[in-house]
Amino acid sequence: MVIYADRINSLPPYLFAAIDKAKGEMMRKGVDVIDLSIGDPDLPTPSHIVEAMRKAVGNPTRHRYPSYEGMLSFRKAASAWYKKTMNVDLNPENEVLTLIGSKEGLAHIPLGFLNPGDISLVPDPAYPVYNIGSILADGKPFKMPLLSENDFLPDLDTIPARIARKAKIMFINYPNNPTSAIASIRFFEDVVDFANENEIIVIHDNAYSEMTHDGYKAPSFLNVNGANDVGIEVHSLSKTYNMTGWRIGFAVGNPEILAGLGKVKTNVDSGAFEAVQDAGIAALTGQQECVHNMNKIYTERRDALIAGLKRLGLPVKKPKATFYVWVPINGDASDFAKMLLEKAGIVATPGIGFGEFGEGYVRFALTQSVARINEAVERMHKLDI
Ligand SMILES: *Cc1c(COP(=O)(O)O)cnc(C)c1O
């Protein structure tokens, strides 16, 4: 008999397993399933990035072990991109660290900063890796509820003082998955104050900074005075450049915090494939037209879905960023998602999959064409919900 470690046994159950299974069954029955549950861009990586990869992969100097911190040329490109998009100055030598996708960095951070039993402040609902990474490091996640009445920002005043004093790290993520909420500079300032008062390291996941609607510009955490003293920002090329499969991202900010993450990385991985870093340089330094074009497509899809859901009488708000729509449901949202799948062949993610405070919501991802989204809306209409 195989005996798993307690930390594996204590992981929360994979709540999407049931829905994956139900979806598979529907597809086997021949149902034309419209999957609005996937947070993975459906459109291809822009061709100039693919071309850069094609060239790089033929270059033998790229075939060897990379350095764990990433090529200096990639870190320089990330630093220049930060200056241009966020107006933040970063030293590529020690304020930028290449990641094998941002999830890799997010999962490894708790290993660098939590001793067994140390508290990590994690939002709920959230991208699961903040919570799971903390558990895998034998830390104790303390949930910060993201509630509609607080515009899905954590209410720092409700964190008990004894918890705040004991906490070592805090994760935040705006523009937010799954709620699509955004944060103001003012909120980031409050986080910096809170972090200083309680000596907490802040990790801001900014994976969706470039995926915005209606001209909204998402700020960097590092735009706030003092942020670089207390935290880092984690970035991904996955969503911005349709590169989820390539595994490339980077972390920026406080050099000592990055060094702690780097120490973990030198011992558990050997860096991102250098050809992929070359492709990443092409993405960060090349034309950004592709980003604007993608956003136009997501905005059209958002408008189609929002209009459809409003006609159904659902109280949805137009998100200013991300490719998610977070919809409050009257009654049990998991039953609602189940009903959508069984009666209309539509897959949406029940909010509870992102944590207990996701209960009462479902998440739709805008990763299908306008035509498919309209088809989904038509099917929902026929259901008379
Ligand atoms: C998609 C996503 C990421 C990106 O992960 P990668 O590992 O870079 O592909 C990070 N954070 C959030 C909240 C996401 O939704």
Image (cartoon, rainbow, N blue to C red):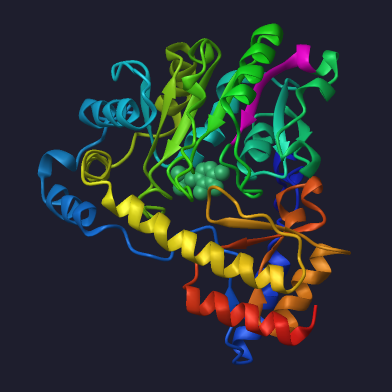
> Residue placed farthest to the right in the image?
331
Residue at left 33%, top 63%? 44
Q: Is residue 168 magenta?
A: yes
The residue closer to the viewer here, 60 or 157, is: 157
Residue nearer the viewer, 138 or 315? 315
Q: Position of residue 211 (x, y in %)?
A: 45, 48
Highlighted magenta segment, given as a residue range: 164-173
Which quarter of the figure is the N terminus placed in?
A: bottom right
Picture layout, residue 33 above or below residue 302 = below
Observer able to see residue 1: no
Q: Residue at x 60, y 27 (%)?
A: 110
229 horizontally vs 331: left or right: left
- Which of these two is toward me, 80 or 13? 80
Residue 45: horizontal and vertical position, in percent? 31, 58
Secondary structure, magenta segment, majority class:
strand
The spot of residue 148 in percent (x, y) is: 77, 44
Image-quadrant location for residue 137: top right
